[in-house]
Image (spheres, rainbow, N blue to C red):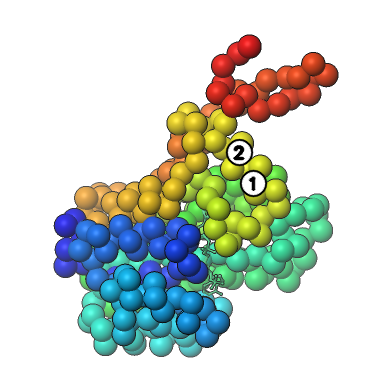
């Protein structure tokens, strides 16, 4: 019961395939008590059974992070429920479809602003608004992807947002370190979720990752969940400002194990063995 006595809030559960659900489940299994949020009424009904399963009945709140008043209301609800909280999971990202395919140069300012607001600024705003109710040794976790470090086809605008998110984690970690509060990110390998469905050719990303990662597989929300739970727990009490890869090792690869067909076209080597 690594999380026994810990109380927190998880933002970003859309359904039971969400990475945030994997993290919430791992925390619940280790004894944590939580509140979870939903985006709007459309998701309230769908998520109600999930809230019940996670033991959050009565602690199930609306929070569209583009609405500052909903973040303020969330703080008031959490304070009423728990007094202080020990952890925050920010598992939220959004970019208009035009930003996730096509030519990078075609991205509009409007799409850019929306993606940065929802996927990056929201972490700063949530941290600031919930700061007065954070306990000593509280831990904040967000989710990133390798496309914020290196080029990934179609990840386009979200790649820029993730780069900004990863630096936000480091600046927040420095700022809040003096208060004992830690801020980290998990950079997860690709997982088939609702958000991922918006990325062009996502199924190819899954194949490519499994083919080239050292562990020759894709990761699951349970695996990301367990690593997330560690970063939220006291087991990681000296870890802050970290971007922790949970990607079957994909990020360490410098040269993918590609084979060439008879026409000299590269094909994926499924097991990395030469012919
Ligand atoms: P997901 O299940 O679709 O979760 C994304 C969440 O963001 C949803 O709950 C969505 O709410 C929420 N959201 C979007 N706009 C919002 C807003 N304005 N206010 C509040 N919530 C909002 O997909 P996921 O893959 O688990 O994504 C979670 C995080 O992991 C994201 O940051 C994503 O970039 C990151 N990540 C994903 C992968 C992957 O391959 N899946 C890999 C690495 C990192 P609604 O669904 O209700 O709109």
- The extreme top residue here reads 275
Q: Secondary structure at mark 1?
A: helix
Residue 98, visible in the rendered structure: yes
Q: Which residue, given by chain and number where applicable, does mark 2 sit on?
A: 207
Residue beneath the point at 48% across and 88% down: 69
Horizontally, residue 214 falls left or right of residue 53, namely right
| Residue 240 position in % (x across, y down) | 33, 52
Residue beneath the point at 63% across and 11% down: 275
Label ID, residue 203: 1
Q: Between residues 11 and 260, which one lies in front from this camera angle? A: 260
Q: Between residues 229 and 22, which one lies in front from this camera angle? A: 22
| Residue 106 position in % (x across, y down) | 81, 58
**Callout 1–callout 2 Cβ contact below 8 Å:** yes
| Residue 67 position in % (x across, y down) | 54, 83
Residue 176, visible in the rendered structure: no
Which image quarter: residue 20? bottom left
Q: Secondary structure at mark 2?
A: helix
Residue beneath the point at 76% across and 19% down: 261
Q: Does 222 appear above or below 204?
A: below
Q: Does 164 appear above or below 274?
A: below
Horizontally, residue 153 falls left or right of residue 237, namely right
């Amino acid at each position: 019961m690594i999380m026994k006595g810990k109380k927190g809030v998880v933002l970003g559960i859309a359904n039971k395939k969400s990475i945030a659900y994997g993290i919430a489940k791992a925390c619940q299994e280790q004894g944590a008590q939580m509140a979870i949020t939903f985006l709007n009424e459309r998701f309230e009904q769908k998520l109600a059974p999930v809230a019940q399963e996670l033991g959050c009945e009565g602690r199930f709140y609306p929070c569209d992070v583009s609405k500052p008043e909903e973040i303020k209301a969330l703080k008031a609800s959490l304070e009423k429920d728990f007094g202080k909280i020990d952890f925050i999971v920010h598992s939220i990202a959004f970019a208009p479809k035009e930003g996730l395919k096509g030519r990078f140069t075609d991205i509009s300012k409007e799409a850019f602003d929306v993606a940065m607001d929802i996927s990056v600024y929201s972490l700063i705003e949530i941290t600031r608004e919930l700061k007065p109710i954070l306990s000593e040794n509280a831990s904040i976790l967000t989710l990133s992807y390798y496309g914020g470090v290196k080029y990934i086809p179609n990840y386009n605008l979200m790649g820029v947002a993730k780069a900004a998110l990863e630096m936000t984690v480091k600046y927040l970690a420095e700022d809040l370190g003096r208060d004992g509060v830690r801020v980290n990110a998990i950079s997860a390998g690709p997982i088939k979720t609702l958000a991922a469905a918006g990325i062009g050719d996502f199924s190819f990303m899954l194949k490519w990752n499994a083919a080239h990662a050292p562990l020759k597989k894709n990761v699951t929300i349970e695996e990301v969940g367990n690593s997330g739970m560690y970063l939220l727990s006291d087991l990681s009490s000296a870890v802050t400002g970290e971007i922790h890869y949970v990607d079957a090792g994909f990020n360490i690869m410098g040269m993918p194990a590609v084979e060439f067909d008879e026409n000299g076209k590269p094909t994926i080597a499924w097991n990395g063995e030469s012919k």
